[in-house]
Amino acid sequence: MKLRIGIQKSGRLHEDSMKLLKECGIDVSNGVNKLKTEASNFPLEVFFFRDDDIPQYVEDGVADIGIVGENVVYEKNKKITVVEKLGFGKCRLSVAVSRNDDYDGPRFLEGKRIATTYPVLVDRFLKEQNVTAEIHEISGSVEIAPGIGLADAICDLVSSGSTLFMNGLKEVQPILQSQAVLIRNSGLSDAQMAILQKLLFRIQSVKKARNNKYILLNAPNDRLDEIIGLLPGMKSPTVLPLAEKGWSSVHSVVNENEFWDIIEKLKEAGAQGILVVPIEKMII
Ligand code: PRT
Ligand code: ZN
C-alpha cells in the first residue's frame, strides 16, 4: 500500500514542497521532466502536476493527497479535505486599482470591470459586499489589464507588491490570505489514513522545528532565576554548572516570533555567550 501525493511540477511551490518531503526524511528524486517518482524509504508515490489541476486530481482519486495554495483550493472548490497548513507559499489575493484612484471601500467597485484569474473568489467577495461589478476572467498577466484599458481594477495574488508597483497599481483590499496546504481525498481507506497520519506527524515535527530555535547561554548564578524566567523551554530549561565558579550554562528552546524580544531581555539580565542553533526536528 502506497499513498500518492500530487505536487507542483515546476513553479513557486515545487521546491518548498520537495524540501518539506526531504525534511520529513523522505527520499524522492527530483521530478523535472518526469510525471512521477517514488520515495525509496516511505510508502509514497509523488506525481508532478500543474498546481491548478491538483484539487481535481485529489477529488478524483488520481492522487490521494496534494500540496497546493489555498487560493487554488478555494477557487476550484472541489470536494477535498484540507489537512494542514504548511507555512510556505504565503501570499494574499487582493484587489488593486490605479495608483491615482481614490479607493474608499468595496463600493468603489460598483459597476466597474475587474480583471482576475480568480473569478469564483472575486464573485464571492462582491456578493458578500453587495457590490455588482463585471468580472473579466483572464489567464495571465492580470496586472497589465488596467493599463491597456481592459479593466478598471484587478484582483490578483500579491506577495512583495513589486509587480503592482511596477504597473502603476496599488493594493487596496485583501480578500484572501493564502499559503500552501496539504489536502486529501475525502474517502481515504483506513490503511491510507494510517500512512497519512505518519506523514502528518513528520510534517508537524518539521513545522515546529522551523518555528523554534535552540538557545545556549552562560548565566551568572546570582541572576539565574531571572534568566530562567525568560526561557519557557519545552518543559523547563536545562541548567549545567560551568567550570568557572558562579556561572551556569543554560539551554532552552525559543519561538521564532518571540526570539529577538527574548534575546534583548536575556542580555539585560546579564546573559553572555548566547548561541542560537536551528533545530532539525522537534517531537513533543
Ligand atoms: O504551471 P503552474 O500552473 O503549476 O504554475 P502557476 O504559474 O499557475 O503558479 P505559480 O508557480 O506562479 O504559483 C503557484 C502558487 O504559489 C500560487 O497558486 C500561490 O499559492 C503561490 N504564490 C505565492 C504565488 C505568489 N506568492 C505570487 N506572488 N503565486 C503567484 N504570485 C504572482 C502573482 O500572480 C503576481 O503575478 O507573483 C506576482 C506578484 O508577486 P509580487 O512579489 O510582485 O507581489
Ligand atoms: Zn497554475
Image (spheres, grey):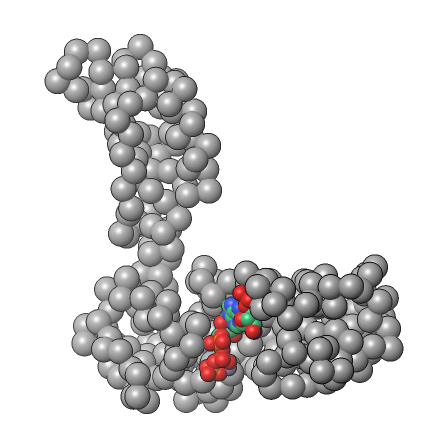
Query: Does 234 appear above or below 117?
Result: above
Specify the farthest residue to the left.
Answer: 243
Nearer the observer, 64 or 247 = 247
Does residue 239 appear anywhere in the picture?
no
Q: Residue at x 27, y 66 (%)?
A: 22
Q: Give the total number of marks visible in the rendering.
A: 0
Nearer the observer, 159 or 125 = 159
Nearer the observer, 90 or 225 = 90
Query: Does 106 appear above or below 37?
Result: above
Coordinates of residue 88 in the picture (x, y in percent): 44, 62
Residue 77 in the figure: left or right of residue 272: right
Q: Residue at x 28, y 52 (%)?
A: 281
Does residue 262 appear anywhere in the picture?
yes
Quarter of the image that includes the N terminus: bottom left
Coordinates of residue 262 in the picture (x, y in percent): 42, 31
Specify the quadrant of the image occupied by residue 213. Answer: top left
Residue 70 in the figure: left or right of residue 28: right
Q: Residue at x 19, y 72 (%)?
A: 41
Coordinates of residue 132 in the picture (x, y in percent): 85, 77
